């Protein structure tokens, strides 16, 4: 996870591009976050650049498994 949380019971899907701005679920603009990071992203405390960087890192980690 972005913050290092390992409790998978609180994971959520976040739309990096706000759903209201682009009302479709495009996997290219979605990532899994813990509830705390999701709330931070919704408040704008995590930039889109940070979120896309985290998404790229997660994809790399999964592809190595």
Image (cartoon, grey):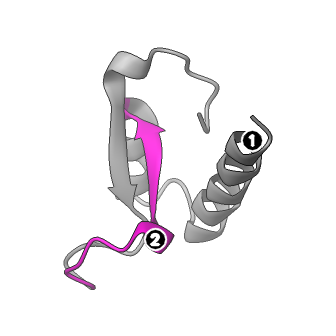
- Inspect the magenta stretch and tell me whether residue 33 lies in it: yes
N-terminal label among 2 and 1: 2
Q: Residue at image x 65%, y 69%?
A: 49
- In this rendering, position of residue 4 left or right of residue 36: right
Between 56 and 2, which is closer to the camera in this rendering?
56
Count of numbered circles in the view = 2
| Image quarter (top left, top right, bottom left or bottom right) of the N terminus | top right
For residue 61, the mark is: 1
Between 16 and 57, which is closer to the camera in this rendering?
57
| Image quarter (top left, top right, bottom left or bottom right) of the C terminus | top right
Which is closer to the viewer, label 2 or label 1?
1
Q: Residue at image x 56%, y 69%?
A: 48
Q: Report whether residue 31 is seen.
A: yes
- Element on which disc 1 rests: helix
Residue interval drawn in magenta: 22-35
Q: Residue at image x 34%, y 48%?
A: 13
Look at the picture and state if 60 lies above or below 4: below
* Label 2 neighbour load within 10 Å: few <14, some 14-19, many 20+: some
* Label 1 neighbour load within 10 Å: few <14, some 14-19, many 20+: few
Say which quarter of the image contains residue 55. bottom right
In x, y percent, where is residue 2? 61, 39
Look at the picture and state if 59 lies above or below 4: below
Look at the picture and state if 5 lies above or below 14: above
CA distance for labels 2 and 1: 18 Å
For residue 44, the mark is: none
In x, y percent, where is residue 57? 74, 50
- Element on which disc 2 rests: helix
Q: Which residue is mark 2?
A: 29
Say which quarter of the image contains residue 38. top left
């Amino acid at each position: 996870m972005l913050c290092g949380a390992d409790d998978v019971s609180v994971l959520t899907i976040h739309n990096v591009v706000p759903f209201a701005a682009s009302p479709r679920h495009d996997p290219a603009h979605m990532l899994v976050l813990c509830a705390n990071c999701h709330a931070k992203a919704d408040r704008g405390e995590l930039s889109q650049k940070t979120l896309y960087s985290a998404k790229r890192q997660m994809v790399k980690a999964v592809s190595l498994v």
